[in-house]
Amino acid sequence: MRRQGTACVESNKAETQQVEKPCTEETCEAADEEDEFPHPIPWQKIEAQELDCDYGLLFSKEEASRLFMQLEEEVEYFTGEEAKLQVYGKTYSVPRKQATYGDEGLVYSFSGVHLAARVWTPTLEYIRDATTNATGHTFNFVLINRYKDGEDHIGEHRDDERELDPSCPIALVSLGAVRDFVFRHKDARKEPKKCHIEPVKLELAHGSLLLMNSPTNTYWYHSLPVRKKVKTPRISLTFRRIIKGRQKRKKE
């Protein structure tokens, strides 16, 4: 359970448990017919002030490696203007490869770019369905980031775009190199700091699943910082649920 009324984070305790998530009628019709997830995995609860995450291993090492190699064959990454983003009016090349897949007609907008979803590949459908079976949540979109080595990275940000369904968590599947994943509270990013809130640092293992529940993305930024000692690639898949009526249209 989430801690209530905590002013500052002194330490982050984790306990291993199976977590059953309630689902809305829109996102989890199938879950109404079952008392527990079809394929529950051992969950580690990660909590801090206004941070609520669940972490576990979704795939064995062998299966994760097989899925990684299949994605290397199937996924088409963006190039040209779609491989850039805008920050404070300036355009930058993305320091990683990106791709978006999902249901027909979906568009995801962030940092001045509008990325249309390609049709699900067989491997992406398999990973999506495994994530649904483990969490009880359904997803209609995935953003894929490929980091060629520890030089590729992503800066601090929140997955809080208006088109995302607030009742559905963000599900992050990691394949490939183990990388550090860092949460930082929004009140710890600005001066004067309202409170000393320690960052929450995780190591995302090969085949792991991190579930970022509400209200995590409202209060906490997350990043994948540069790690020069990492020499092998990693593929990150963040599954989301987009509400079609809230999308920004992609410019022709």
Image (cartoon, grey):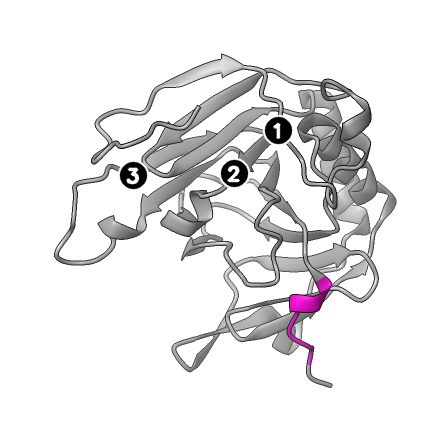
Look at the image and say whether residue 191 sits in the magenta stretch.
no
Distance from the alpha carbon under mark 1 to that under mark 3: 25 Å
Q: In the rendered image, which residue does mark 3 sit on?
A: 199
Residue at 37% of width from left, 48% of height from top? 219
The three-letter code of the residue at mark 1 reads Lys
Q: In the rendered image, which residue does mark 1 sit on?
A: 21
Residue 123, position in %: x, y? 82, 41
Q: Secondary structure at mark 1?
A: loop
Label count reads 3
The three-letter code of the residue at mark 3 reads Pro
Estimate how packed mark 2 is, as few (under 14), some (14 to 19) or many (20 or more) residues with alpha carbons within 10 Å: some
User: Toward which corner of the image does residue 8 lie, by quadrant?
Assistant: top left
Q: Which residues are magenta?
A: 244-250
Estimate how packed mark 3 is, as few (under 14), some (14 to 19) or many (20 or more) residues with alpha carbons within 10 Å: some
Q: Secondary structure at mark 3?
A: loop
Q: Secondary structure at mark 2?
A: loop
Q: Can you say whether 139 is above or below 76 in the image?
A: above
The answer to which of marks 3 and 2 sits earlier in the sequence is 3
